[in-house]
Amino acid sequence: MQKIDIVNLALARLGQASIASLGEGSEEAAKANAVWEGALLTTLQACRWGFNTARQRLALLEEDPDGYPYQYRYAAPSGMLQPYEIVKPLMVGEAIPFIFEQDSIYTNEPDAVLVYAERSDKVSSFPPSFQDALAWRIAGDMAMALTQRPDMAKLAEDMFQKAISNARALAGMARKAERRTPRYIQARG
């Protein structure tokens, strides 16, 4: 699926005609271009999607930062949209307390590994559940401008929330399997 396909799915959900190109001069194309970025970022942050979840050892900026109850301040990864958790390097599922402020991650973990959502613009990597949610988000964002019907905007928002709920359920099932045994124990065989 390509960007135009997701936009056309959103338009179809609103009962609107499809467009041939996002560069055409139609009102639909203009509205789609106007809402794409915000809808994409909202949808990327709405759920812990597997395709844009990353894991990275953090770069230490300072120890014992003033004014914080944590021992370490790390640089947030570039391209990070939202931090999920800090884990110990050799453990799966051992969440460690942290806070995220002004491009810094604060924690008491001396060798912190952050699991986080990263920005993803590669439409071909979007799984079907993400495509569905994104199309509903775009539909909701364009509904009033294209249909002048509040009920269509409400329906699209409700369907977006349902798509996110379904995606969270699927993601939760996958993470349950991941959080069973520390890696070093798994490696023992």
Image (cartoon, helix red, strand yellow):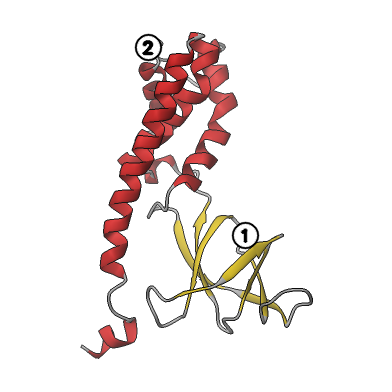
Residues at marks 1 and 2 touching, judged by CB atoms closer than 8 Å: no
| Label placed on residue 78 | 1
SS assignment at label 1: loop
x, y percent for residue 185: 28, 87
User: Which residue is at the far bottom?
Assistant: 188
Q: CA distance from mark 1 to mark 2?
A: 39 Å
Badge 1 or badge 2: first in the primary sequence:
2
Between marks 1 and 2 in the image, the one whose residue lies nearer the viewer: 2
SS assignment at label 2: loop
x, y percent for residue 112: 55, 77
Could you classify mark 2 by the number of other residues whose Cα lies within 10 Å: few (under 14), some (14-19), or many (20 or more)?
few
Q: Which residue is mark 2?
A: 15
Q: Answer with left or right where residue 117 lies relative to residue 125.
A: right
Q: Answer with left or right where residue 189 lies relative to residue 153.
A: left
The amino acid on which the numbered mark 1 sits, given as a three-letter code, is: Ser
For residue 51, above or below residue 54: above
Quadrant assignment for the C terminus: bottom left
| Label placed on residue 178 | none
